[in-house]
Image (cartoon, rainbow, N blue to C red):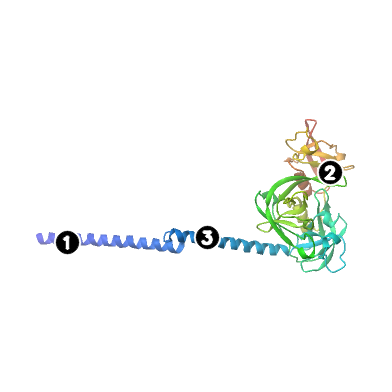
């Protein structure tokens, strides 16, 4: 019996030691696997010294910067394939990109926005609707173009040349732009030597209003994107793009009395028109016949007027639908078809969506009294 108990005791001790050994081995294996995982999949931690971690962070930062620079280089190279030179006068040679081309030919910039030859630019570059101009593509080919749409109030135009399967730019969403966002302006600032020049900067401000002095008359351009990317006269009509290569604005004007202040018309203003030309080959423009200012402009024209909401009507065009249905100067337009109006751009973009003979309902504040006016668009 005593011998049996001794054997049992030795067996228990042996089993206990075996269990402890196995547990230690398991802990060791788990620890080893964890360290291997840290070393293979998380090289910035665990097995690295602080000095190596910092060196690796610097290396990764350099790689990221190089990758970003390579990416934007590729993006700009792609966008440049859709940038054209535009002149109101026919070149005596095969291209509008001539020495002194800007002064001799009124050289400006445009961007191809569809694969079948619709080009977006400034009206002062191309001329008004039904006029013609001349276009030079990046490959040097020269075309006569017809102006199929223009709007002098926002200084934009769309022209058409007869090409197919052309590279074209991607239109972004200008409502999403943020102050401080990186942007790039592309254009033809002087002539041949500087065609498709790229400058970089940031979004300095949005919804800017500026005064334009022409022939002893003052007018205002509203809802502009302000940037410190250099914009010279020949850049007019070229794209302002974001870091993804999307067009968010059309370079339009520059304040010559200040350095580092350029402006672009938001691309959303004209996207509807581009889409209709692309899908229907035409744009039947509905017509209301008013011009109104945002509340930001009111202090320029009437310091005694306080405008909290809506847009302020300063002009009713003769024989227009607005005149016919009783809209008046100094009316404040609060909404159209239930959509609140904060900027003239809001009204303009909504009307662009409509067709002639469509009806719209305007909420109007007149002499502190709100009235409703239904208008059939011309």
Q: Earlier in the sequence, mark 1 or mark 3?
A: 1
Residue 374 in the image: x percent, y percent?
Answer: 81, 39
Circle 3 is placed at which residue position?
Answer: 58
Q: Nearer the viewer, mark 2 or mark 1?
A: 2
Q: CA distance from mark 1 to mark 3?
A: 61 Å
Mark 1 surroundings: few (<14), some (14-19) or many (≥20) residues within 10 A: few
Percent across and percent down for residue 126 are 84, 57
* SS at circle 2: strand
**Mark 1 sits on what residue?**
10
Closer-to-camera residue (148/301): 301
Q: Name the residue: 69% across, 47% down.
A: 205
Q: Nearer the viewer, residue 330 or 106?
A: 106
Q: Quadrant of the N terminus?
A: bottom left
Q: Secondary structure at mark 1?
A: helix
Is 305 located above or below residue 143 in the figure?
Answer: above
Q: Which residue is mark 2?
A: 218
Q: From this viewpoint, is residue 53 visible?
A: yes
The quarter of the picture where residue 97 lies is bottom right
Q: CA distance from mark 2 to mark 3?
A: 54 Å
Relative to 338, say whether 171 is above or below: below
Image point 23% across, 61% down: which residue? Answer: 17
Horizontal and vertical percent position of residue 371: 79, 33
- Whether residues under marks 2 and 1 lie with C-beta atoms below 8 angstroms apart, the answer is no
Check contact, mark 2 vs mark 3: CB within 8 A.
no
Q: Position of residue 115 (x, y in %)?
A: 75, 63
Label located before the other in sequence (2 or 1): 1
Q: Earlier in the sequence, mark 2 or mark 3?
A: 3
How far apart marks 2 and 1 lie (CA) works out to 108 Å
């Amino acid at each position: 019996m005593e011998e049996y108990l001794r054997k049992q005791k030795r067996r228990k001790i042996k089993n206990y030691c075996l269990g402890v050994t196995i547990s230690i081995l398991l802990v060791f294996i788990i620890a080893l696997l964890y360290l291997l995982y840290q070393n293979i999949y998380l090289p910035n931690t665990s097995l690295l010294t602080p000095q190596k971690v910092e060196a690796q962070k610097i290396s990764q930062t350099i790689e990221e910067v190089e990758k970003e620079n390579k990416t934007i280089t590729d993006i700009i190279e792609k966008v440049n394939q859709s940038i054209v030179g535009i002149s109101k006068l026919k070149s005596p040679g095969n291209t509008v990109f001539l020495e002194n081309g800007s002064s001799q030919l009124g050289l400006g910039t445009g961007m191809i926005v569809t694969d079948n030859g619709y080009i977006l630019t400034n009206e002062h570059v191309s001329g008004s609707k039904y006029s013609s101009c001349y276009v030079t593509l990046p490959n040097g080919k020269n075309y006569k173009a017809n102006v199929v749409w223009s709007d002098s109030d926002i200084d934009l135009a769309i022209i058409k040349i007869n090409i197919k399967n052309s590279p074209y730019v991607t239109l972004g969403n200008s409502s999403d732009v943020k102050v401080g966002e990186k942007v790039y302006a592309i254009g033809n600032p002087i002539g041949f030597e500087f065609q498709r020049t790229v400058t970089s900067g940031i979004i300095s401000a949005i919804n800017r209003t500026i005064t334009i002095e022409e022939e002893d008359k003052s007018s205002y351009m509203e809802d502009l994107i302000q940037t410190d990317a250099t914009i010279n006269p020949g850049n007019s009509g070229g794209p302002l793009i974001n870091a993804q290569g999307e067009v968010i604005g059309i370079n339009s004007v520059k304040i010559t009395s200040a350095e580092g202040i350029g402006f672009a018309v938001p691309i959303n203003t004209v996207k509807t028109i581009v889409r209709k030309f692309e899908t229907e080959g035409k744009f039947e423009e509905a017509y209301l016949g008013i011009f109104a200012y945002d509340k930001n402009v009111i202090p320029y024209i009437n310091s005694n007027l306080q405008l909290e909401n809506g847009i302020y009507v300063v002009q009713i065009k003769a024989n227009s639908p607005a005149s016919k249905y009783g809209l008046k100067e100094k009316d404040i337009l609060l909404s159209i078809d239930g959509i609140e109006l904060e900027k003239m751009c809001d009204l303009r973009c909504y009307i662009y969506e409509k067709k002639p003979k469509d009806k719209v309902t305007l909420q109007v504040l007149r002499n502190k009294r709100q009235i409703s006016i239904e208008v059939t668009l011309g």
